[in-house]
Every structure is written in structure tokens, then in C-alpha cells.
Amino acid sequence: MTAIDTVKSRIADLYRTDPDITANINLTASRSRKTVLSGVHAVIKGVYPNIFRIEEASTGNPRQFTFRYADVLTKTIEISELGIELAEEKRPRTARRQ
């Protein structure tokens, strides 16, 4: 199972069991606009083969964001409920040449 498959599976499990999450979001939408949200309450609204959607309302107006599963691995979005073990997963080491 690849790291992406692990992320997909964990997010799908959260969506089915308890879609309320705490997220840290760091997005650059364009050259002039950057969105940074830390520790916001969000709800997973949909899980699809290549993307997932969340909704947050920390500013009073609900906003929806769409992310790729790779965004979790690159830390564009961090989901507290996934745990730190995802970030610490390492690829198998290759033999070093001596």
C-alpha cells in the first residue's frame, strides 16, 4: 500500500465515522493571495477517487476547499485526526553503497 493509498483510506474512514476534523491549511491560491488557517474546525464533505472536500466556517462564512490526497503528504493541509504517524512514514531504505 502506497502512502497515497494510506491517506485515502484514513480520510475515507474519517468521512464514514466522524467527518468533523481539526485542520491546518496553508494554500497559495495565486501570486497575491495566500490562505493560512491554523487549528480550524472543518467537516469532510466528500471523498472521491482523487480528491476530497472539506468545509470550514471560522470566518463566519462557510468556505469549501478541495484537496488532493498528496496535499496531506506535502503538508498543504494537516489533519490532526490522521495522527502524526502519516507524516513520519518513511519509504523503504535502499541498500547503501560502500
Image: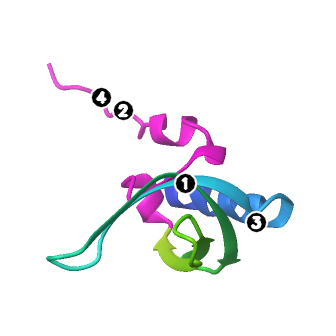
Q: Nearer the viewer, mark 3 or mark 2?
A: 3
Would you call the spot at circle 3 few (<14 residues within 10 Å), some (14-19), or many (20 or more)? some
x and y percentages locating residue 2 in the rendered image: 52, 55
Kindly report the distance in space between the C-alpha atoms of the residues bearing marks 4 and 2: 7 Å
Question: Which numbered disc flags the more N-terminal residue, 3 or 1?
Answer: 3
Query: Which residue is label 3 attached to?
Result: 15
- Residue 4: horizontal and vertical position, in percent? 51, 60
Disc 4 to disc 3, C-alpha distance: 39 Å
Marks 1 and 2: which is nearer the front?
Answer: 1
Q: Quadrant of the N terminus?
A: bottom right
Judged by depth in the image, the label closer to the viewer, 3 or 1, is 1
**Residue 16 located left or right of residue 35:** right
- Residue wearing tag 2: 93
Query: Which three-letter amino acid code belongs to the residue tagged 2?
Result: Arg
x and y percent of residue 31 in the render?
14, 77
Q: Give the residue pinned by disc 1.
A: 23
SS type, badge 2: loop
Residue extent of the magenta highlight: 69-98
- SS class of the residue under badge 3? helix
**Labels 4, 1: front one:** 1
Q: How many marks?
A: 4
Is the C-beta separation of discs 4 and 2 under 8 Å? yes
Query: Which residue bears the numbered disc 4?
Result: 95
* Numbered label attached to residue 71: none
Front residue of this view, candidates 79 and 47 = 79
Q: Which mark sits nearer the N-terminus, 4 or 1?
A: 1
Location of residue 42 in the rendering, given as x and y in whole percent from the top left corner: 63, 63
Name which residue lies at 23% across and 26% down.
96
Based on the picture, tell me whether residue 70 belongs to the magenta stretch: yes
